[in-house]
Amino acid sequence: MIQPNSSRWRARIRCLLRLGAALLLLLALAVARRSYFAFRDRMPGYALDLEVDDKPSRAAPRPLRAGFARVKINPDLANPQRPVYLAGFNSNRKATAIHDDLWAIACVLDDGHTRLGLVALDAIGFFHDDVVRVRQRLLADWKLNYTIVCSTHNHSTPDLMGLWGPHPLRSGVDPRYREQVIAACVTALGGAVSNLQPARLAVHEIPCPSEGLVADARPPRVFDPDIRVLHFIHATNDTTLGTVVGWANHPETPWSRNTEITSDFCGYLRDALEHGVTVDGQTVARGLGGVHLYVNGAIGGLMTTSPGVNVHDPYLGQDFQKPSHEKARAVGHQLASRILPRLSSSDLPLAEYAPLSIRARTIGVRVDNNLYLAGGFLGLLDRGYVGWRTVRSEVALVTVGEASLACVPGELYPEIANGGIESPAGADYAIQPVEVPPLRELMPGRVKFLFGLANDEVGYLLPKTQWDRQPPFTYGARNAPYGEINSCGPDAAGSVHAALAKLCRAAAAAQPASRQQDAKLP
């Protein structure tokens, strides 16, 4: 019998071990390289610590000016080789037609000392890196002290975040469309600057019960129900220049089987405010003219006109329950039927002066969601990280005369805005509420807007005491509630709340003594 040469076999084994080690090293280097490019900071060194006080404007008031402009942001559906993937429900939902137009709509305000820009996008969301790209392209001649870019969170628009491609492992974002939207924001802001005109301002808060409009899919049942409006009227001829309308609801009315591009109820509302409503050739509601922005509010929870909500169209006299474009129109008409009478016949005094103040801060939001991290590694979520498990985001507090605007970079649960946070049995953290007091108790001004998905979309911002991933589940549920799966983590809301609370207290401290006493802020 021939015995194998033991030294030769040992040499072969050593060679195989070295080869295996080399392959493992190459694999580790490839993973490290992939991780670096996936999680690298897209905007290295970018940070914002802005404080523009309204003291100069209050000391030397100058007439308010307002300008509006809009740019269409419809995607190109002509090339079947480049399908447009719709965001918000499931993967591989390809757009088949454009039912109505999508827009980037801009408003620019100037109090003679400070200039503010605002863009509202018909979009599912817009990451902070893209907001920074918009700001980097603004011309110095436009003299914008600060710019806000909000998304309506529309679920019948192209994927701009990466989660709804042809399959769960491929992004649905078309870089060319993302560039189109960025350019449209810049163009709209430039147009609004060019359209600046002398203006007067009326600020409205309009009751709007949730029944028949919005359902809350998760206890506790807390809503952000009311409509808030900034109404800008030409200073000399009393025509409407435009409005900024704030309300809280997911624009997903046509629901998950819809494959047509649409601006949902936001577009129907804007059209009704501008043109009015005509039924069978008869004008049943007269429009205001002008250009109108819709900005979403505290929609976490989940605030939605679900298929179970029956919506009555006050102009058509019909009810709609099944998801459809007609149901979206009914929601828009419900809002318009409350807004138009108020704005057309209001006896509120019109302010010729509306001092602007701006406080904005870059913040870090910790990402504990492993699905988000995996999405970044796979290239689905194309946004930069500024530290270990940390993304750059932003909060802001703006005051416009007697109104204040809190800019929240995600989908805030209404109880964080208005109160009602609970510590239910079965929650993962047996602690006292963290995100207190409610933001609207801290915000200055008579009318307090909450701008959701402002300058970023970090997902749901839910109270830590209601965080519920592990059994037993809260409120007797059999399964974990929806929300946590689309949140950065249990500390995200606390980070945003703490940063905004700090801005609110700074704004309160900057007010004259008489206004501080009136505000009685905690």
Image (tube, rainbow, N blue to C red):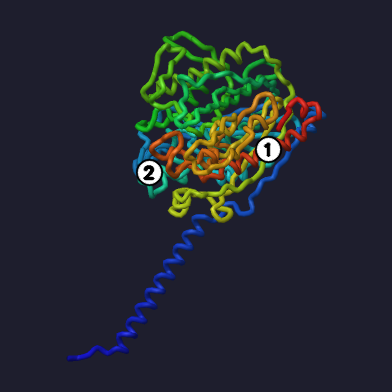
Element type at marker 2? loop
Q: Is residue 399 left or right of residue 476?
A: right
Q: In the picture, residue 230 is in which quadrant?
A: top right
- Decide: few, some or many residues near mark 1? Use Cα within 10 Å; few <14, some 14-19, many ≥20: many
Q: Is residue 205 left or right of residue 353?
A: left
Please provide percent x and percent y for residue 217.
44, 30
* Whether residue 183 can be seen here: no
Q: State the separation of the CA atoms marked 2 and 1.
A: 36 Å
Element type at marker 1? loop
At x 44% / y 26%, what residue is drawn? 305
Q: In the picture, residue 241 is in which quadrant?
A: top right
- Decide: few, some or many residues near mark 2? Use Cα within 10 Å; few <14, some 14-19, many ≥20: few
Q: Is residue 323 left or right of residue 120?
A: left
Residue sitting nearer the eye, 175 or 393: 393
Q: Which residue is mark 1?
A: 144
Q: Which residue is mark 2?
A: 82
From the image, which quarter does the C terminus lie in?
top right
Q: Say if 245 sits above or below 124 in the image.
A: above
From the image, which quarter does the N terminus lie in?
bottom left
Please provide percent x and percent y for residue 417.
59, 32
Q: Say if 67 sits above or below 341 in the image.
A: below
Amino acid at pointer 2: Arg
Amino acid at pointer 1: Leu
Numbered mark located on residue 89 in the image: none
Please provide percent x and percent y for residue 72.
50, 32
Residue placed furthest toward the top: 282
